[in-house]
Amino acid sequence: MKRNTKNQTHVSEEEIVKQYRFMDLIKEINAEYEMKSGRKRLVFLQSFGCQMNENDSERLWGMLSEMGYCEGKNSEESDVIIFNTCCVRENAEEKVYGHLGALKKQKADNPEKIIAVCGCMMQQGHVVETIKKKYRHVGLVFGTHNLYKFPELLYNAINENSPVIDVDESPGSITEGLPIERKDTIKAWVTVMYGCNNFCSYCIVPYVRGRERSRSIEDIVNEVEELGRKNYKEITLLGQNVNSYGKDFADNTSFASLLRELNNIEGIERIRFLTSHPKDLTEDIILAMRDLDKLCEHLHLPIQAGSTRILESMNRKYTKEDYLNLVGKIREKIPNIALTTDIIVGYPGETEEDFEDTLDVLRKVRYDFAYTFLYSKRTGTPAAKNENQVSEEVKKARFERLLEVQNKISKEINDKLLGTTEEILVEGLSKNSVWNYTGRTRTNKIVNFKGSKELVGKLVKVKITGTQTWSLEGEVISW
Ligand code: 5AD
Ligand code: SF4
């Protein structure tokens, strides 16, 4: 099957071969070090962002393993420290600066230590300037667009005395053929497209992740087939706006056609995807979710705000009514679907009446869960220039009210599941010591239960015996 061929946005095969050569060179350096010192070189890598950022970190781990590095428990004992950063909200950025500041002494004590920063934050010129001026102990800076160049840049950082700074400001490309080392053995993230064209007025992502570009169906299918062979049971397709998958191809490849293709892959039992933009969630995607057995009954559909006036100012391209109609259509086709959302509280100009609209949507839609964020001013976005910024005090008070409404709804929805039987995919040990194993329903709800090791990675039927706001408790019935 030849559907869509690689286009000019792909990093060339020669470039990838070159990076493998750098991986080999560093592997030799590390082997020599191990011979002399009797220990392997260690890396401490911390991610600060979304699942795409975590997936990028898995690529970094793939390359690091090829180079002979092992994982360090903390920054003190590690030879290379990497922060994979996020810039969607200010607090994530502040955390990174805090961590970097704390490493100054470690670098002074051990000049061979390499401190590297990468990810979305580095795609902003002012951040790189700040690092150059105030964090001189940072030895390597690279961005999201040139992550594939990590081996070469690390090699240079090892061999040069001055910091290596390389951030590609082009609209971005696609890289295939890099190694990957996933943290999980049952569930896997698969990035299907990169970038975003939507320019929601509060959001920095389109400026740091570049324009929308889709991986070819063949490359995605190959990756998922391999996951199936490796006994992975669940995949989550990732993209800033997965619904516009394929729009950059000349043929009529769509997200729904990708879903249909992936549904046939052996071994994979469950398919999820993140994130959907309501304006692009077409009927064919809803029908694919209804008809394809592996597509889970869960949809993350960010509304961001309930007021049409605010939605317009956010450049979201739908009204409150459009959104509610869409939810009606989805529920008509898939009645048992769980819906989750993202909400921003305190967007510039948000009045009490606007905020009431958000609460109204919560009560009407009755989400299973809502990810709620205080509006964070991002330099370079149109909303940052808006003079009607909402005070922190008002934002926080609204945030609390929103949580109260949503938590009550989440608990009521969970309470209805008491006594029902659910299929869960067992993920492993639970953080909760009483219920020692944990899994998720197809609707993405966490279920804690008393189980045993053999159940991990299996689909198991559980009876729901208890409910909390964000999780359920159950008893295994059969597997
Ligand atoms: N302030 C607060 N939240 C934001 N998000 C994106 N940009 C901002 C911002 N400037 C939220 C949106 C998005 C989620 C990933 O992060 O709700 O859906
Ligand atoms: Fe940001 Fe909007 Fe794109 Fe989502 S769709 S990444 S919120 S610009």
Image (spheres, helix red, strand yellow):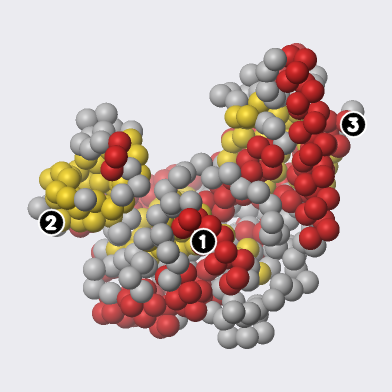
Image position, residue 348 (x, y; %): 53, 59
* Label 3: element kind: loop
Q: Earlier in the sequence, mark 1 or mark 2?
A: 1
Q: Nearer the viewer, residue 377 or 473?
A: 473
CB-based contact (under 8 Å), mark 1 and mark 3: no
Q: Which residue is mark 3?
A: 160
Between residue 171 and residue 406, name the one nearer to us. Answer: 171
Q: Position of residue 138 (x, y in %)?
A: 77, 31
Q: Is residue 396 left or right of residue 470?
A: right
From the image, tell me which residue sits under label 1: 224
Q: Which mark is residue 3?
A: none
Query: Is 130 situated left or right of 388 in this image?
Result: right
| Secondary structure type for disc 1 | helix
- Give whichever of discs 1 and 3 has the lower sequence position: 3
Residue flagged by tag 1: what amino acid is it? Val
Which numbered mark, 1 or 2, is in the foreground of this view? 1
On residue 420, the disc is 2
Left or right, residue 97 beside residue 475: right
Find residue 355 and report its image quarter.
bottom left
